[in-house]
Image: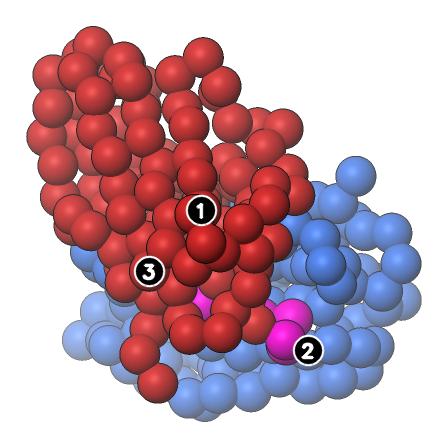
Chain colours: A blue, B red
């Protein structure tokens, strides 16, 4: 079946540090890949997505590239801010099927 | 465009009591999901609707959980009787023609 694995958190960084959160997946076919972010007390918000191999999703300074050869979709940001502190979820979906989420990675950015 | 609306936002009940959550999807979104998110974990699918029909309810604990989507728009999720382990956030999400789901802010349930 489909599954998503993320690096365990929490991840603690200083402001302006470089961020990488690893995500790998197992799926049949050619799934779409997503990163969702959850701020304290809120629901999940779509951060970025990629629908086919070698696509790069980007939003708010975050980027992730769909790597089919390594079945990965790592999230990166060059310079994090305190306001980026949240839980980040990697997810996949084969069109028309259920979305499968990773366990989430908590990021804390210190001033 | 209005987002996914959920209510109530917060609910505290005693075990063995019942509770109901309501979801109003984004207009025109045919697919609706209910997820359960236990603290520190990722969302787990409970049930998926396509219009007013159930697509997947394989992970719904049917002895205590029920859900319906009358007329293919609003949906309700009910828990009766509640157990302590049902304490979680219940997230409603909807999907339109694009392969992206949009979440509501969630209904936070505490069972004491």
* Numbered disc in front, either 2 or 3: 3
Say which quarter of the image contains residue B20: top left
For the C terminus of chain A, which image quadrant? bottom left
Q: Residues within 10 Å of mark 1 (few under 14, many from 20)?
A: many
State if disc 1 and disc 2 touch (CB < 8 Å). no
Circle 2 residue: A50
Check the image and report above or below for B65 versus A44.
above
Residue B98 vs B94, above or below: the answer is: below
Please tell me which residue is depicted at 68% across the width and 85% down the height of the picture.
A56
Disc 2 secondary structure class: strand
Question: Residue at image x 32%, y 53%?
Answer: B23
Give a yes or no on whether discs 1 and 3 share a subunit: yes
Q: Chain of mark 1?
A: B
- In the image, which residues are magenta? B97-104
Q: Specify the principal SS of the magenta part.
A: loop
Residue A34 percent location from the top left of the image: 60, 68
Q: Are marks 1 and 3 in contact (CB under 8 Å)?
A: no
**Image point 75% across, 84% down: which residue?**
A55
Q: Do we see residue A13 in this rendering?
A: no
The residue that label 1 is drawn on is B69
Query: Element at badge 3?
Result: strand
Name the residue carrying label 3.
Answer: B24
Q: From where the camera sits, is residue A68 visible?
A: yes
Quarter-of-image position of residue B40: top left
């Amino acid at each position: 079946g489909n599954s998503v694995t993320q690096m365990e958190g929490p991840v603690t960084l200083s402001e302006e540090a470089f961020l990488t959160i690893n995500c790998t997946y197992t799926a049949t076919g050619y799934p779409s890949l997503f990163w969702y972010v959850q701020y304290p007390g809120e629901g999940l918000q779509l951060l970025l997505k990629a629908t086919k191999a070698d696509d790069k999703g980007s939003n708010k300074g975050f980027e992730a590239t769909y790597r089919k050869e390594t079945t990965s979709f790592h999230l990166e940001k060059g310079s994090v801010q305190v306001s980026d502190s949240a839980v980040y979820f990697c997810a996949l979906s084969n069109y028309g099927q259920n979305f499968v989420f990773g366990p989430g990675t908590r990021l804390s950015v210190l001033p | 465009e209005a987002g996914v609306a959920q209510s109530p936002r917060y609910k505290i009940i005693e075990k063995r009591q019942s509770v109901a959550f309501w979801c109003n999807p984004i207009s025109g979104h045919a697919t609706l999901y209910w997820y359960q998110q236990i603290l520190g974990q990722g969302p787990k699918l409970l049930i998926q609707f396509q219009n007013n029909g159930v697509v997947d309810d394989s992970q719904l604990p049917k002895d205590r959980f029920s859900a319906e989507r009358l007329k293919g728009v609003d949906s309700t999720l009910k828990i009766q009787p509640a157990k302590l382990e049902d304490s979680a956030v219940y997230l409603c999400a909807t999907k339109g023609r694009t392969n992206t789901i949009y979440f509501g802010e969630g209904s936070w349930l505490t069972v004491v």
